[in-house]
Amino acid sequence: MKISQLQAFVAVADQGNFSSAALELNLSQSTVSHAIATLETDLGIILFLRGRHGATLTPEGEQMIQEARHILQLIESIHKKASLARGLQSGQVRVASVRSITTHVLPKIIRQFRNKFPTINVVISEFDIYVEVEQAVREGQVDVGFTSLPVTPGFEVWELFQDEFVALLPPGTIHPETTLTWEQLASYPMILNLRSPRHNQSVHDHFSQFGQTLKIDYEVREDSTILGMVQQGLGATVMARLVAEPIPEGVQIKSLPAPLKRTIGVIISSDILLPRTVFAFLDVLKEVWRENTKLA
């Protein structure tokens, strides 16, 4: 059985006569007639009833036409994938994110992507704050951005996961099984990261909902500095769990008295024509996340 025979079979079924099918396939009518006759001989059945008003499927032909269509669709899919692969032999994907996402999220995605497309480079740009990631994507400096949601208009957005804000406390200051209260949290000197204005505002607004205020004793510019200070007993902090990883030895982790989470997602510009490599990267990203969801 040849592909050309199946193409003729489907074309005649769709057009209802051999001449129109020949025009659709850009073949002579005799070639189409020969393809159908040969297919009928090979199968040992009659597929069409021929008459002055055209060709109609026999009951046997009706039973087989869907399978023929499906085979041709699969063949078309193979050609499309091959064409896509030919177009993905080189190039790059430019990705922007903040440190916590670069450290804990991107490596697995990039590994899977490079396994599938080893000749495509992934260029990573790290930024201190989310608004810089959005700006880089909007201005076309990068193709894909990993950031905190929601974002301003002008992006296509995919939500990935939620990351809980936790209280990080000095070693041994609270019983491991104790549920943290607002009063207990307020008793610690608080340490703030000046380079995380969005996180700070989220935490401030969350505390305000419950009549709580943060008394800031220290303001620094590095998460690692904050973690070191907490480990040395100088104070406590509220930080997104992913940002805090890896947690220094001895530092106690507690959920807030009322949960607070940030939503992490991926964005691309709605206004910029992006290369195929970007959509291949997004496909791999979605595959990785589906696998993570199944394992969770």
Image (cartoon, rainbow, N blue to C red):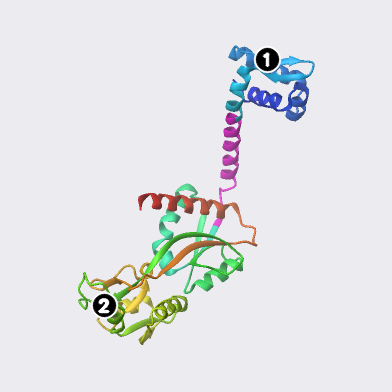
| 266 vs 190: above or below | above
Question: Residue 159, position in %: x, y?
Answer: 49, 60
Q: Is residue 221 left or right of residue 70?
A: left
Question: Residue 107, position in %: x, y?
Answer: 41, 58
Q: How many angstroms separate mark 1 from mark 2 (CA)?
A: 83 Å
Residue nearer the viewer, 64 or 36: 64
Residue 100, by quadrant, is bottom left
Q: Which residue is pictured at 50% across the width and 58% down the height?
A: 122
Question: Residue 272, position in %: x, y?
Answer: 64, 61
| 2 vs 127: above or below | above
Q: Is residue 89 magenta?
A: yes
Q: Which residue is pictured at 43% across the width and 65% down the height?
A: 101
Badge 1 crowding class, 10 Å Cα cut-off, few under 14, some 14 to 19, many 20 or more, is some
| 244 vs 208: above or below | above
- The residue wearing badge 2 is 231
Label 1 sits on a secondary structure element that is helix
Residue 74, by quadrant, is top right
Secondary structure mostly seen in the magenta stretch: helix
Q: Look at label 2 and name its amino acid.
A: Gln
Residue nearer the viewer, 178 or 198: 178
Q: Look at label 1 and name its amino acid.
A: Ala
**Of marks 1 and 2, which one's residue comes earlier in the chain?**
1
Q: Magenta stretch: give its range.
A: 70-92
Q: Which residue is pictured at 30% across the width and 75% down the height?
A: 168
| 233 vs 291: above or below | below
- The residue wearing badge 1 is 37
